[in-house]
Image (cartoon, rainbow, N blue to C red):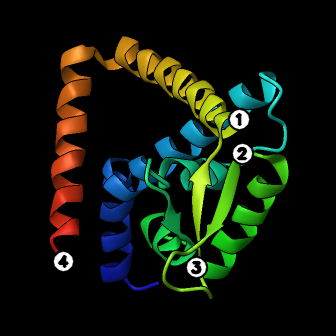
């Protein structure tokens, strides 16, 4: 390796621990693992994070699979598979679209709502742990900052 590339690599390695991508990726990884383990301990062994993403993106009025996939940043095929899995477990129901008979809308059932309430408890417990680490003020600043970044992306 030439001296110039070696120096650049040394500089890279010296600051790589401050990389936002690394922080977001690792925190997301740990959050998902902790949430999944918590839900498994409550008897939801079959639940995956994709299922949670589906449930949290349905809304009270229901939604079609294409919109659901878009909201959850998934392909329609992946979302269709998750819909079928949650449908089979009774967490959601489908209903033929009122005007487009080729399409259907997805709705949360009472069983799905109960699952969401359990997931909310899990998320709140993790959030409380994060607050105990960084403090309430810093946690609020972090959420506000991430919200502003997401708002900027959503303008596109």
Tell me if 102 is positioned left or right of 156 in this view.
right
Q: Judge by depth and name the residue closer to the eye, 118 or 129.
A: 118
Are there few (<14), some (14-19), or many (20+) residues within 10 Å of tag 4?
A: few
Q: Which residue is mark 2?
A: 91
Q: Quadrant of residue 83?
A: bottom right
Give whichever of discs 1 and 3 has the lower sequence position. 3
Looking at the image, residue 37 sits to the left or right of residue 131; the answer is: right
Q: Label 4: which residue?
A: 156
Picture layout, residue 69 above or below residue 139: below
Depth check, mark 3 against mark 2: the one in front is 2
Q: Nearer the viewer, mark 4 or mark 2?
A: 2
Q: Mark 1 sits on what residue? A: 111
Residue 84 percent coordinates (x, y) = 77, 65
Helix, strand or loop under label 3: loop
| First in residue order: circle 4 vs circle 2 | 2
Nearer-N-terminus badge (2/1): 2
Q: Is residue 29 left or right of residue 61?
A: right
Q: Residue at x 58, y 54 (%)?
A: 107
Q: Residue beneath label 3, please?
A: 75
The x, y position of residue 96, in whole percent, is 62, 73
In this picture, is 43 found above or below 15? Answer: above
């Amino acid at each position: 390796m030439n001296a110039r590339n070696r120096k650049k690599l040394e500089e890279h390695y010296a600051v790589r621990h401050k990389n936002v991508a690394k922080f977001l990726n690792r925190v997301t990884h740990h959050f998902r693992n902790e949430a999944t383990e918590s839900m498994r301990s409550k008897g939801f062994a079959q639940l995956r994070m994709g299922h949670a993403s589906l449930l949290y993106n349905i809304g009270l009025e229901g939604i079609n699979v294409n919109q659901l996939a878009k909201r959850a940043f998934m392909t329609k095929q992946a979302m269709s598979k998750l819909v079928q899995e949650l449908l089979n477990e009774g967490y959601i129901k489908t209903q033929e679209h009122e005007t487009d008979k080729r399409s259907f809308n997805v709705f949360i059932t009472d069983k799905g709502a109960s699952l969401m309430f359990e997931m909310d408890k899990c998320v709140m417990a993790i959030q409380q742990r994060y607050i105990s680490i960084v403090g309430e003020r810093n946690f609020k600043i972090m959420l506000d900052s991430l919200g502003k970044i997401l708002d900027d992306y959503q303008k596109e």
